[in-house]
Image: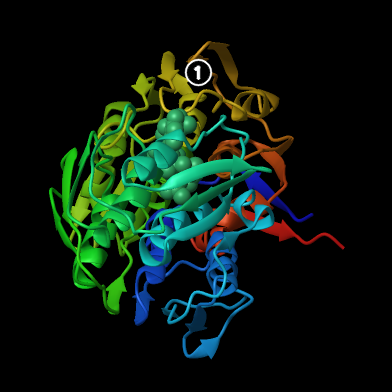
Amino acid sequence: MDSIRIRGGKPLNGKIEISGAKNAALPLMVASLLTEETLTLSNLPHVADISTLISLLCQHGATAEMNGQSVSDGCSDGRSLSITADRITSTEAPYDIVRKMRAGALVMGPLLARIGKARVSLPGGCAIGTRPMNLHVSGLEQMGAEIKIVGGYMEAEAPAGLTSAEIRFETVSVGATENLLMAATLAKGTTVLENAAKEPEIIDLIQLLRQMGADIEGDGTERLVIRGVDKLHGARYRVMPDRIETGTYAIAAVITGGKIELTNTRAELIRSVLDILVEAGADVVETENGLVISRSAARINGVDIMTLPYPGYPTDMQAQMMALMTIADGAAMITETIFENRFMHVPELARLGANITVHGHSALVRGVQKLVGAPVMATDLRASVSLVLAGLAAEGETVINRVYHLDRGYERLEEKLAACGADIERIVAS
Ligand code: EPZ
């Protein structure tokens, strides 16, 4: 398995172009199953999850072309992907794919809506929590689907098609909102989703679905109204910038005491993160095409954070902010309210000298003068990148193992950081 070696302690200065958002691109790609016509997405990030989802869509019968080349195995560099699902040849989303990438389970709503059948593996728990599928299942049942759990699979049928329903989510769920939103576009009648997620990725999906001919109201609010239509058509759409990548590199500038211009992005996507960074002592200047972020003060202030659904502080930026707070003056209380087990980076940050105590859903970070490099390992994407950030600030050498987590969600990470002066390299396993 590859690893990444960082020799830390250097301020990062330069420019980083932000890629398209993985978490927006995945549901947009799944929307291709709703139409026989071609969906073309541009500004697609080149990360492992995108390739995994291409393989899943192709095994449902879709054909895919990346920059004009056929890519049924999902392995190709590129930015522009065309997917055509003119025929659905299989309604099964197998365990092997869905266990690797939970977004695979989003095919259930579109397959049910289009052909009334889906057999989708339960994704199972993962390092950050149990992550059940009850909200997806109960919403689709309220729309007329019959769903049984057999052998680890959700076996769903709606022989007479899906019908409209008024669905109230008991918790805000990005994935369940996306799944039901897609299903409702082709259901009979008007579906209302209450307590829906408001994340920018949901708005991106609504905008695409609308371009495909869907009738949806309520973008950015917790009440979405979807009037079902008979058919959707193809579309061309540009994937939004990755707000989590934007926030991650913003912290890279602040944690190393440097200055980075982030382009191809929008500050408003990470307002809650920037507010905390400014409180911690960062300077932010918004530009037409992104932002410039720097730290002029010698030290960072400790700031408390609590993760919440959008527009609150994102859980996907919790580990990175914790890395920053390890070298702050004073203490910071970090409370995780979205996932029950998202502190696996804590013992690894401690290996670099961080002083963190976890009490239930909160972690108390007492800032230390400096971190010192060490070998570390992480069990999920954002935890891994928090170790990269800590390694950039730490004195000496940090080796991060299990880099495949990073490859799932960060495009050309080493290249982007090295261009700003980081001493970082990938050690390819022989
Ligand atoms: C999306 O996951 C993101 N993934 C996650 O990013 C992100 O952390 C999460 O939203 C929250 O913002 C993608 O977009 C591909 P949820 P999702 O359904 O949709 C509970 C990353 O690092 N829940 O909003 O799976 C659930 O257990 C990843 O890029 C139920 O109880 O998250 C969690 O506690 C990690 N029942 C909470 O809701 C359900 O049926 C929010 O989960 C569904 C969810």
**Residue 199 picture location, percent across and down:** 28, 44
Residue placed most toward the observer, 296 or 141: 141
The vertical placement of 347 against 45, above or below, is: above
Quadrant including the C terminus:
bottom right
| Farthest-out residue, right | 430
The vertical placement of 304 against 324, above or below, is: above
Circle 1 residue: 367
In this rendering, position of residue 245 left or right of residue 187: right
Residue shown at 25% from the left, 73% from the top: 231
| Farthest-out residue, top | 359
Locate residue 425: give its quadrant: bottom right
**Residue 13 picture location, percent across and down:** 43, 55
Residue shown at 27% from the left, 33% from the top: 278
**Residue 11 picture location, percent across and down:** 48, 46
Residue shown at 25% from the left, 60% from the top: 185
Residue placed most toward the observer, 37 or 23: 37
Mark 1 secondary-structure assignment:
loop
